[in-house]
Image (cartoon, rainbow, N blue to C red):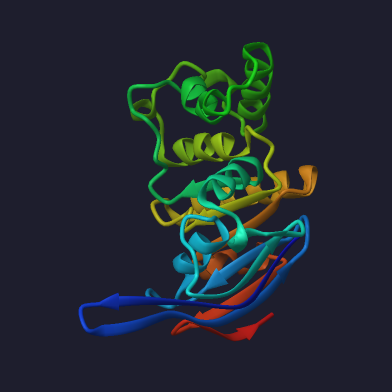
Amino acid sequence: MLELTNIQKKYRIGATELWALKGISLKVAKGEFIAFKGPSGSGKSTLLNIIGMLDTPTNGEYTLDGVNILSANPRKRSEYRAAYLGFIFQNFNLIPELNIYENVEIPLVIVGENPKLRKEKVTQVIEAVGLTSHLHHKPGELSGGQMQRVAIARALVKNPPLVIADEPTANLDSKTGIEIVKLMKQLNQEYQITFLFATHDEKLTELMDKIYYLMDGEFVDRT
């Protein structure tokens, strides 16, 4: 599905050069459930940002379904990101003034989806995450676990082949965090959606197909 070859990322802070990634190579097949683990500053989020086309590497190659992402212009990358990717963040990033239905609907509104199809897709994905009875609730009326379920529904409503989850359990208690990742695992198995996580959470290890450990911008071990 996607392949990274010798991905490097350099940041400049004043006169200092910081290499956030030092030559990451990786192949991910469709339907895999993968975690990137490591301490803060190890490069996990930088790697996900590059895969998610939110950042570009200093060096290296990135192909997604045979498309050379790094040779595409910004507009094309934006189109690929809209077509291929869903995002789940640790802070949920829901709009407090909108209810659950409206928050989940946003990605379809942005891409100009037909209103009838939009309603079908939103209703279906909210049912999939178990929140049909909360359609008209606003984020402030939900628990942390429920808000993350909304965020999952929003990420999946376009039926993306790839979902990127950056520390999705960081603001949840351990029991709720495991329940949320089990839900994502269930959706992964039912719909063959590929999930890539950045996480510190050791308790999630047993749910992953593969784990890649990062330290100082490099893979140091993998299972």
Q: Residue at x 22, y 84 (%)?
A: 15
Is residue 71 something one can see in this rendering? yes
Quarter where residue 210 is shown: bottom right
**Of all residues shown, which one is farthest toward the bottom?**
220
Q: Tell me the residue at 48%/57% (across/down).
A: 166
User: Which sits in the foreground, 26 or 71?
Assistant: 71
Name above or below for residue 191 compared with residue 25: above
Question: In the image, residue 50 lies at what x, y percent?
Answer: 52, 63
Say if 39 sits above or below 139 in the image.
Answer: below
Q: Is residue 177 above or below residue 6?
A: above
- Quarter of the image containing the N terminus? bottom right
Can residue 200 be seen in this snapshot?
Answer: no
Q: Position of residue 33 (x, y in %)?
A: 69, 60
Q: Position of residue 34 (x, y in %)?
A: 65, 64
Q: Is residue 122 left or right of residue 14?
A: right
Q: Position of residue 150 (x, y in %)?
A: 51, 34
Identity of the residue drawn at 52% across and 19% down:
135
Give 181 or 164, whichever is nearer the viewer.
164
Left/right placement of residue 30 relative to residue 147 reads right
As drawn, 157 above or below 28: above
Q: Quadrant of the C terminus?
A: bottom right
**Outermost residue toward the left?**
14
Name the residue: 42% across, 51% down: 90
